[in-house]
Image (cartoon, rainbow, N blue to C red):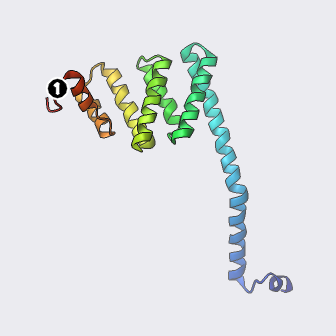
């Protein structure tokens, strides 16, 4: 009783509030850092695996690791998740682009998404449209409209190159 009085606990409600406060402090100072450490370890393992897969695709393990390192830095700079960039890289290379060509497309897409403020959603939409174009080997209306919807004026640029107006 004296211990509870000294701690300012007057009843069961105060005791429950104290336990909740201790739980919150524990979660903040122990739980959150542990979860962060776990996420860092998972990302490291994901990046290492991606580096090995990329090295195997490129036929050069060092080049694969450098490519994954560049994607990681780009992900941190733009907020586009690393997993999305790695998936985009894999899709582009599966569609026939060289690793260097895929990195170039990733960089341009990342920069466009950053300028337009669309983040991961815009990045994924553009990569999806580019891979559709690769698969069809022709510029069909569907993927071009997807690029337009992402904020990239594809039709206008094509019209300029073809000396036509967009309604043609």
Percent from the top left, x then y, of residue 99?
Answer: 50, 19
Residue at coordinates 42% horizontally, 38% vertically from top-left?
113
Q: To which quarter of the image does residue 9 belong?
A: bottom right
Residue 20 drawn above or below residue 157: below
In this rendered view, identify the residue nearer to me: 140 or 115: 115
Task: Tell me the element at label 1.
Answer: loop
Q: Position of residue 85 (x, y in %)?
A: 50, 32
Quadrant, the C terminus? top left
Q: Quadrant of residue 95?
A: top left
Residue 89, percent from left and from top: 48, 26
Quadrant where the N terminus sits is bottom right
Question: Which residue is pictured at 42% across the width and 32% down the height?
Answer: 109
Q: Which residue is mark 1?
A: 164
**Residue at the farthest top position:** 59
In the drawing, does residue 84 fall left or right of residue 139?
right
Total numbered labels placed on residues in the image: 1
Image position of 116 with respect to 89: above or below = below
- For disc 1, the neighbor class at 10 Å (few under 14, some 14 to 19, many from 20) is few
Q: Nearer the viewer, residue 120 or 54?
A: 120
Q: Residue at x 62, y 37 (%)?
A: 43
Residue extending farthest to the right is 2
Q: Position of residue 123 (x, y in %)?
A: 42, 37
């Amino acid at each position: 009783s004296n211990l509870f009085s000294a701690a300012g606990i007057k009843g069961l409600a105060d005791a429950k509030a104290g336990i909740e406060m201790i739980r919150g402090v524990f979660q903040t100072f122990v739980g959150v850092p542990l979860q962060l450490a776990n996420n860092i370890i998972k990302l490291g393992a994901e990046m290492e695996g991606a580096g090995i897969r990329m090295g195997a695709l490129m036929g050069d393990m060092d080049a694969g690791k450098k490519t994954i390192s560049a994607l990681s830095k780009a992900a941190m700079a733009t907020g586009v998740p690393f997993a999305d960039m790695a998936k985009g890289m894999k899709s582009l290379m599966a569609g026939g682009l060289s690793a260097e060509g895929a990195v170039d497309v990733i960089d341009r897409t990342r920069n466009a998404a950053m300028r337009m403020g669309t983040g991961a959603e815009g990045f994924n939409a553009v990569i999806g449209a580019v891979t559709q174009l690769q698969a069809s080997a022709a510029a069909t209306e569907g993927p071009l409209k997807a690029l337009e919807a992402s904020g990239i004026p594809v039709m206008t640029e094509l019209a300029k190159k073809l000396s036509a107006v967009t309604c043609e």
